[in-house]
């Protein structure tokens, strides 16, 4: 039977198993918990090293931490390597660059973008570089200050895009691969009050798909070789008829570049889109997330399964994908404390 390994992060307390390693059976969508880690508070986001032997978690609290772990899925073992300060409150996102040499992170409340070296054994080195965002947006409750929410590498380049929910901006930085320093290249302004959160790249075409948390929209950009974004398309993620509260959270492109998915918290759904030849999207509709508050999800590499972290219902939901590329059936629901991140170990 074909199996994969999955890591999940959560908003569990320090005394609870906050990070879990799962075995995923591709034939039937079954998830089996193999082992877990305690001793880290609110490990909300995970980044797996390109070599698959280590990963880093954010401890998303005030004066937070970045924590590295050794992992060996086949022997069902995980072990902490070391910790470093996140250099700001509430580290919300972390990325390991394609070389495996640098760890890049953002702090939501601290508004810092940080770079740490990664050592050969997976340990996190001392802070190499930091820059702080300034500004605000029209949503007084959520955009009182800059709130960088993610930092994601442009595939194949030393370029990184930072989505700032507080300032309605997506910023392109270039990484000096020798020194770990970031240089500002470009900044694009989204719709006022949109709240850009996460983004995902098309695997073969120069397009970026960005999810806006606050106004529940998806934006399509064309990206130049230098990392400059050009706006192409804006799409709603919930129906006009929906009158409840909603915040959109995660976005992902299927590995073959055919589909784009985004999650809605409140509407509790997964929006599906088919990618056109020119990179624009056509709406395929909405499917239930199988739980409440789908904060994050992972698409299996073959695009046959989607695993959703439903934070508010404390469930991981395994959705089977239909022939049209949309989630069609709930195959499995697992109870687990406040899951908020799903990572497939390649």
Image (cartoon, rainbow, N blue to C red):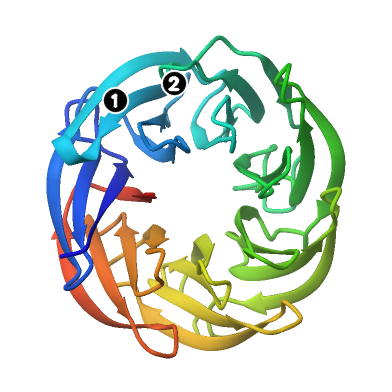
The first of marks 1 and 2 along the sequence is: 1
Q: Nearer the viewer, residue 283 or 166?
A: 283
Q: Residue at x 74, y 52 (%)?
A: 168
**Residue 205 at what x, y percent from top left?**
72, 68
Q: Nearer the viewer, residue 192 or 270?
A: 270
Labelled pair 1, 2 in contact (Cβ < 8 Å): yes
Q: Nearer the viewer, residue 61 or 254?
A: 254
Q: How busy is the neighbourhood of tag 2: few (under 14 within 10 Å), some, or many (20 plus)?
A: many
In the figure, is residue 140 to the left or right of 333?
right
Alpha carbon separation for disc pair 1 and 2:
9 Å
Q: Is residue 34 above or below residue 86?
A: below
**Residue 266 at what x, y percent from top left?**
41, 68
Q: Residue at x 42, y 21 (%)?
A: 122
Would you say residue 134 is visible in this rendering? no
Secondary structure of the residue carrying numbered label 1 = loop
Question: Which residue bears the numbered disc 2?
Answer: 65
Which image quarter is the N terminus in? Answer: bottom left
**Residue 288 at what x, y percent from top left?**
34, 78
Count of marks placed on residues: 2
Q: How busy is the neighbourhood of tag 1: few (under 14 within 10 Å), some, or many (20 plus)?
A: many
Question: Which residue bears the numbered disc 1?
Answer: 40
Q: Is residue 225 above or below residue 144?
A: below
Q: Quadrant of residue 44?
A: top left
Q: Nearer the viewer, residue 342 or 169?
A: 342
Secondary structure of the residue carrying numbered label 2 = strand
In the figure, is residue 7 to the left or right of 74?
right
Q: Is residue 247 above or below residue 180?
A: below
In the figure, is residue 243 to the left or right of 208?
left
Q: Residue at x 58, y 59 (%)?
A: 213
């Amino acid at each position: 039977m074909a199996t994969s390994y999955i890591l999940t992060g959560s908003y569990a307390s320090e005394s609870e198993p906050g990070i879990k390693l799962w075995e995923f059976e591709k034939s039937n969508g079954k998830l089996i918990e193999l082992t877990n880690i305690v001793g880290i508070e609110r490990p909300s986001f995970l980044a797996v090293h390109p070599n698959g032997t280590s990963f880093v978690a954010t401890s998303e609290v005030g004066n937070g931490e970045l924590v590295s772990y050794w992992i060996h899925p086949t022997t069902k073992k995980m072990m902490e390597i070391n910790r470093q300060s996140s250099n700001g409150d509430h580290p919300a996102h972390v990325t390991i660059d394609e070389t495996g040499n640098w760890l890049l992170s953002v702090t939501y409340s601290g508004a810092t973008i940080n770079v740490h070296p990664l050592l050969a054994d997976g340990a996190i080195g001392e802070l190499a570089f930091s820059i702080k965002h300034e500004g605000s947006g029209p949503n007084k409750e959520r955009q009182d200050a800059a709130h960088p929410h993610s930092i994601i590498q442009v595939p194949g380049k030393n370029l990184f895009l930072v989505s700032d929910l507080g300032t309605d901006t997506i910023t392109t930085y270039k990484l000096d691969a020798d020194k770990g320093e970031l240089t500002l290249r470009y900044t694009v302004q989204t719709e006022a009050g949109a709240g850009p959160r996460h983004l995902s790249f098309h695997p073969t075409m120069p397009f970026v798909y960005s999810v806006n948390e606050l106004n529940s929209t998806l934006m399509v950009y064309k990206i130049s070789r230098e990392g400059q974004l050009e706006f192409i398309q804006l799409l709603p993620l919930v129906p006009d008829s929906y009158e409840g509260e909603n915040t959109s959270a995660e976005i992902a492109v299927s590995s073959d570049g055919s589909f784009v998915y985004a999650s809605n918290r409140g509407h509790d759904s997964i929006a599906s889109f088919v990618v056109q030849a020119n990179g624009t999207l056509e709406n395929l509709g909405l499917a239930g997330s199988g739980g409440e508050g789908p904060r994050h999800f992972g698409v299996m590499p073959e695009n046959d399964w989607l695993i959703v972290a439903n934070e508010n219902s404390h469930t991981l939901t395994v959705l089977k994908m239909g022939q049209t590329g949309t989630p069609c059936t709930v195959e499995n629901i697992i109870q687990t404390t406040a899951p908020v991140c799903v990572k497939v170990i390649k």
